[in-house]
Image (cartoon, grey):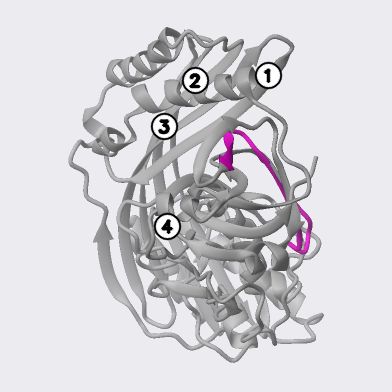
Amino acid sequence: MSNQALADFAVKHALELGASYAEARWEKTSANAFSMKNGIPQLGDFEDVEGLGVKLFFHGAAEYCSTDWMDKEHVKKLVEDGVRNAAASSKLVKEPMLLSSERTVKAKFEVQQKKRIQNVDVDEKFELLENVDGALIEGKVKIPARYLALYDSITEKYFVNSDGSRISSVTPSVGFLLIMTVQHGAHSMQRHLQFNETGGYERLDAWNLEAAVPAEAKAIQKVLVEGVAAPKGTVDIVCAPEVVGIACHESVGHPFEADRILGREGAQAGESYLSSEDIGKRIGSEVPTVVDDPTLPNSAGYYLYDDEGVQARRKTLMVNGVVAELLLNRESAYKLELGSNGSARAMDYESEPLVRMSNTFLAPGECSEEELLEDVKKGVYIKSFTEWNIDDKRMHQRYVGCEAYLIENGELGKPVKRVVLETTTPDFWGAVELVANNVAFFAGTCGKGEPMQGVPVWMGGPSVKLKGLRLGV
């Protein structure tokens, strides 16, 4: 029996046993990772993972179960155990688990590769790492510790549910990770930089790693050597796309996840400053609009159908500072009397789909970054960050600058050491006065759930001017 036939069988058998709803998701991922630590190649990591995850409802109780035994007898037992567990749980259910009604989908999609992952051998991958590492050393920056990794994967999926949806997909992806410590005298700073896109090895061309990585090291060295203290008191701040991206992800994306708002994530990843009745609430100035869009071609968080079989689309979370839309899966959508907007994602076949972000970013404005800077007489430009913190309700947040500069009469001046922006979510978004048009994206791995699930995402946006915020120490 083929893997798709096993998934079909799992759904059919669950219904035969009395389940009111069932879905099955077969996944197969082939992944490779290669790394260098302080110039020394490390052992490669090669992984082939395949399995089937099944979600079913029985008398109002939900059960998620999975197996990597891909044969009919094991799948049959998996479903029977799942129904048995759900039946036992149903005796304790106070509120039946129900899903929003969604359109039946039958679709196939595949992310195309120009330079196929399968055609890039181990020697070429290590050569890529060696070239980047060599360029880093040639920059003559003191780097006592450095770690570089190159990774790729191809994930095949087949989703089927009892509503009649059937969706097949193939998603290749490539990524690069840099962790380095730059030192000058008794002072040092660590930089974490990640690239990730869907597609083949042609995606690396745009990253220009042999130039981008040494440039990061030199920028940090300049901050350590020439950096001055950040101005005290209230100043105007210009945040570049990387800082804007983490703010969008942490203070808009996560608190807009409906399962967090409804309390499911409270003991695991925290809660939210929003309630289910806060659509239409103002949390920022009339300028910022934040969106989440999984359909961006070649993005890290790319998908056309989510892991509940719902068609993906662009979600506008905040419009001109006002809460407009939450991130929803079918369960939370039902509870809020809405339709799902395709925000259910799972890390792998073993993991239950949760409400997740994909590519979350600030929508662009109309001016250039140069025009935005011209508007600042005295302030600080924060290009990148070295650390961030935010509380469980995503209200109080703190960003520590990595590469930052004084702004004097619209011009970038001396580098600034360890500038700290500590504020609240309403104050941050309320201070947005001007938005540029230089949208850029930065890759990350978003964590959520218990056990923890990590999924690839993009975050970003254009540069923004924040009017009159106090810098911390």
Q: In this view of the protein, which residue sits in the foreground, 381 or 177?
A: 381
SS label for mark 4: strand
Residue type, label 4: Trp
Q: Vertically, is 197 above or below 192?
A: below
Mark 2 highlights which residue?
218
- Labels 4, 2: front one: 2
**Distance in Å between CA atoms under marks 2 and 1:** 13 Å
Mark 1 highlights which residue?
188
Q: Tell which circle, 4 or 2, labels the residue nearer the N-terminal end.
A: 4
The answer to whether 453 appears left or right of 195 in the picture is right
Q: Which mark is residue 151?
A: 3
SS label for mark 1: strand
Q: Tell which circle, 3 or 4, labels the residue nearer the N-terminal end.
A: 4
Decide if residue 365 is in sight here: yes
Evaluate if marks 4 and 2 touch, with contact meaning CB atoms under 8 Å apart.
no
Magenta region includes residue 214? no
Q: Tell which circle, 3 or 2, labels the residue nearer the N-terminal end.
A: 3
Residue sitting at x 51%, y 51%: 348
Mark 4 highlights which residue?
26
**Distance in Å between CA atoms under marks 4 and 1:** 46 Å
Residue type, label 1: Ser
- Labels 1, 3: front one: 1
- Labels 4, 1: front one: 1
How would you rate the neighbour count of disc 1 (Cα within 10 Å): few for under 14, some for 14-19, many for 20 or more?
some
Task: Give the residues drawn in magenta, as a range.
Answer: 389-407
Q: In this view of the protein, which residue sits in the foreground, 316 or 148?
A: 316
